Image (cartoon, grey):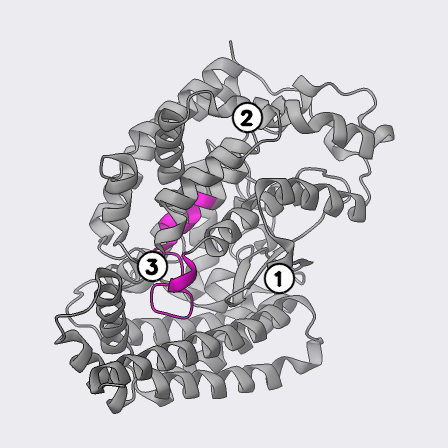
Amino acid sequence: MTTTDAVWADLTSRWQDLADLNGTLALLNWDQSTYLPPAAASGRARQKALLSGIRHARATDDAYGRLLDAAAARTDLSPEQARMVEVARKDFERATRFPSAFVQARSRHFGESYSAWTQARPGNDFARMIPYLEKSLDLNVQAAGYFPEFADPMDYFVDQSDEGMTAAQVDAVFGELRAALVPLADSVIAAGAPRTDFLNRHYPAQAQLRFGEDVIRQYGYDFAQGRQDLTHHPFMTRLGERDTRITTRVKEHDPIDALYSTLHEAGHALYEQNVREDFLGTPLGGGVSAGVHESSSRMWENLVGRSREFWAAYFGDLRDTFPDALGDVTEEEMYRASNVVSRSLIRVDADELTYNLHVITRYGLERDLLSGRLAVADLADAWHAAYESNLGQRAPSDVDGVLQDVHWFAGGPGGAFQGYTLGNVLSAQFFAAAEAANPGLKGDFARRDFSRLLGWMRENVYRHGRMLRPAELVVQATGQPMSVEPYLAYLRGKYGALLG
């Protein structure tokens, strides 16, 4: 073996170690969110802090840095290898900005904060979370401060989740969307709501879970490489190269809440399960950005799962599963009920038109927190004011207000939400490109055939992992930079047809 081959072998071994450490931390997080006994929370936070410190030491080791420098100087690398080194060097340079003690303290605090939130939320006890959230905010402002090239802390967090984007760009997208969506939602709501009374009937939990799992199996989710469990706030996580898990939650008097949660998280998992095999265990072995990742979940949840063709394929099965609850319901009524538009308080339950207003609200509050314009102690009141302004609603308690999302309590304020709306925008852009390449694509769904859509997404999005930067991937896949126009055209077309 030559010296340079030894260097590459050492690098790939280190990358695999880092991937395995990430997977082990993800396993601890998954267990904490699913099966961990409540009394074990403090010990779990300590375990995660220890492992985070070990991972940080590996990720910032001087010898690792020298290996990356040596690899970057080589001229015989393939484009894939060169990109691996480029991404790894960027990750290394970022990791070395953080002191190890800071990494461990931050990890331990977020673990403790999450556990406190699982108890404070059902008790409507935001006061309990104020000191946790104040510390989370301080830690995240401190984290952004290690990167002085970002004058605005939000620029740092946006770039962390959606590389290459700035807060100003997000502001522009959100401004354009809000201007278009508010009057569109108003007009749809004014037209009157469809029948939805049957959604409040009894739908046993296990039957709901089996139905959703049958659908995502046909989507292409591989249960040999994953599983589904219950949690407070649904998520997808990768624990290993062939271990991509999803979670959901079930309401026995709502047959579509768990379904669309399952479809959404399966969309994330389809991305992870279809990254190129030779990228696994390397810096390229995962999704490229929060926005692109979210585009997959929102596509399979909404553009497929809320389509007329989807219900043509699956309503009969759902009615057979719940004959007492759905015996007097038609396919058309279920389609319309799954697309009802209303001003609501809960983001994850929101319809396609108002969902982005929930995100825009949270993003604005995050900006105010990070800039110091808003104190944590005033956050609950600011939440209510923002909801009244953006959605015309006021939560009766903090359970459906500032406590409803896990993000700020498990990771602190900072860049966690804008990816959801960027994903909505990109979902329509990717779907339009897939449809142009596959005429009659929607007709496939009525036959439960998702192979052409999955194949297009695999070839143009999934398989690339982090090989391309987010903006490069979008242009290569769709022929144009990210644009809100395909998304607005999709919404106007869909709801225009619904209203006749």
Q: Residue at x 39, y 63 (%)?
A: 278
Asked whether residue 85 is drawn in magenta, I would say: no
Front one among 381 and 229: 229
Judge left or right: residue 236 versus residue 488: right
Q: Outermost residue toward the front?
A: 1
Residue type (three-letter) at the residue carrying disc 3? Ser
Label disc, if present, on residue 161 of the rendered structure? 3
Q: Where's residue 347, x and y in %?
A: 52, 45
Front one among 227 and 94: 227
Label disc, if present, on residue 121 of the rendered structure? 1
Q: Where's residue 426, x and y in %?
A: 35, 39
Of the numbered discs 3 and 1, the one sitting upstream in the chain is 1
- Is the Cβ of the residue at disc 1 closer than 8 Å to that at disc 2? no
Q: How many marks?
A: 3
Magenta part of the protein: which range?
276-296
Between marks 3 and 1, how big is the CA–CA gap?
26 Å
Q: Residue at x 30, y 55 (%)?
A: 162
Determine the image quadrant of residue 356: top left
The residue that disc 2 covers is 444
Residue type (three-letter) at the residue carrying disc 2? Asp
Judge left or right: residue 349 versus residue 364: right
Judge left or right: residue 23 versus residue 5: right
- The crowd level at tag 1 (other Cα within 10 Å; few <14, some 14-19, many 20+) is many
